[in-house]
Amino acid sequence: MNTESLEKHFNDKIEEDIRIEPKDWMPEKYRKTLIRQISQHAHSEIVGMLPEANWITRAPTLRRKAAALAKVQDEAGHGLYLYSACETLGVERDDLLADLHSGKAKYSSIFNYPTLTWADMGAIGWLVDGAAIMNQVPLCRASYGPYARAMVRICKEESFHQRQGYEIMLTLCKGSEEQKNMAQDALNRWWWPSLMMFGPTDKDSKHTADSMRWGIKRFTNDELRQKFVDVTVPQADILGLTVPDKDLKWNEESGHYDFGEINWEEFYNVISGNGPCNRERLEARRNAHDKGEWVREAAQAYAEKKSRNKAA
Amino acid sequence: MDTNKFNYILQQADNCLILGQRLGEWCGHGPILEQDIAMTNISLDLIGQARLFYQYAAELQDEGKTEDDLAYLRDAWDFRNVKLVEQPNGDFAQTIIRQFLYDTFSCYYYEALKESNDERLASIAAKSHKETLYHVKWSGDWVLRLGDGTSESHERAQSALDLLRPYADELVIPSEADQKAAEEGYGPDLGKIAELRSEKLNAVLSESTLNVPESGFTHSGGKDGRHTEHLGYILADLQFLQRAYPGNKW
Ligand SMILES: [Fe+2]
Ligand SMILES: [Fe+2]
């Protein structure tokens, strides 16, 4: 088949919602877009371990400690599935990591915010995992098979994280005055960054059009952000917490919440490296990788010795 | 309350908690993603074991206390873990050697504790034994890889072993609680465990090409609440929220 008919065949499949698999022909731009999106997602899982890992040793009960360990471990697992999905597109995990460590590859900006109190463990689960679910559930139907399948597994675990985070918030909000303040403070700090997780507004989003056409993306950034606000505000009401947006109000006519303008200057600042923890997060990842080099070398040298011995 | 049994249970509960806490420090910072996951897994198992022991100890104590009271509201002198488990993570080699020295104890310990005449202890041991078999396989495989990997990994593993060897045997030297537990049949004879363990240790270490340092001296005292300086900092982290907000529910 020539390129034209290959491309037609590919487009027909997309049209009919038939999954694209690793061995299928695909346009180079589709492959590149997928690599960019999936690796960015994988990096986000790995960097995303850090803010929560920060509270594992200080978790307030043994039950919470176990849950926090299990959660951060899930995120590491998500990273693994996604790096594997990426590898089906012909790139190596090591090269993807090199791009993360050099600052070339991006990860979700939300993880550049600090976790200052225990309530942040609740707020991250409730809001950050919550926003991640909004973004990711549609990806379970993404056109690329390995990505879609990884997302099915991931979404199941993310929704567990979301409930667990909300339960931490609920416990705090039923607790002492100080605990309620802790919960409110966490909401104040995580609300806007969570809304930013959906990316720039549709008119400023440079990747949306292609991704929608190829069935990698199913809803626009603004649609998903609205959905998140509509779902989350009533949950804040149940907690008895105040969403830090003076413009937030229910709009009878549209059937949605109206909400205030996002601080896009902050958004672009954090993306370009000026968030509160950008340097620390990247440094932690680089450090882990660099300090692990002799370990990886030892494992490889040992495996080679063993296979030589077997052959001999 | 059976004070000896209470103390005896805390020894192992505290070993599990403190080592689990130490391994938890690696979370997010491991040298390889798969090994980050493995260390978190072992940490989770250890925290789980600690909880089972604390729950039982709290029941025996019968003062309406919980697992968390025991973990979060005792000071260092009441902790009965061995000094080995409070040693810092250091580099990956130090973590592996510490883990291997511990796992080669715990797998035989739990195997023997399954025969305890205390049914509750026997059932905790049965569950924990399965987990520990996996742990000792993991740490043992890494001892081989590091010892017989590159010259750098060999050197790192050897210096970790030299550093930690003096902390290894406190686990198998009977405390008063251990002795009485063995006499009354709810705890195993540590002498037998010491033999099995040293066989396993020597086999793996010699295959790994590491030199077993002459065991001249053993640091002890942990089982009686005399610890290294590290434990205070571990507890400062572990207990921070419970201490800062007394009586709150989390
Ligand atoms: Fe995740
Ligand atoms: Fe998650």
Image (cartoon, coloured by chain):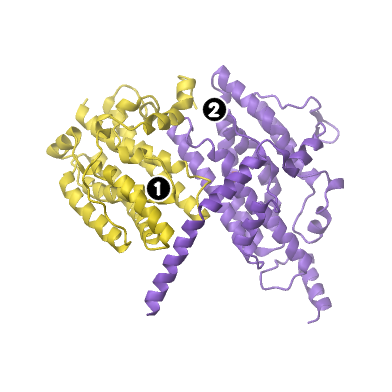
Chain colours: A purple, B yellow
Q: Nearer the viewer, residue A142 or A68?
A: A68
Using residue A262 as the reference point, say whether residue A182 is left or right of it.
left
| Tag 1 secondary structure | helix
Q: Nearer the viewer, residue A259 or A77?
A: A77
Q: Is residue B71 above or below residue B98?
A: above
Chain for numbered disc 1: B
State how far apart marks 1 and 2 are (Cα): 35 Å
Residue A227 picture location, percent across and down: 75, 41
> Residue sitting at 70 percent across and 50 percent down?
A106
Q: Residue A194 occupies which quadrant of the picture?
A: top right
Circle number at residue A171: 2
Q: Which three-letter amino acid code belongs to the residue tagged 2?
A: Thr
| Tag 2 secondary structure | helix
Residue A139 picture location, percent across and down: 69, 54
Q: Which three-letter amino acid code belongs to the residue tagged 1?
A: Thr
- Residue located beneath label 1 in the image: B95
> Residue sitting at 39 percent across and 71 percent down?
A306
Chain for numbered disc 2: A
Q: Quadrant of the C terminus of chain A?
A: bottom left
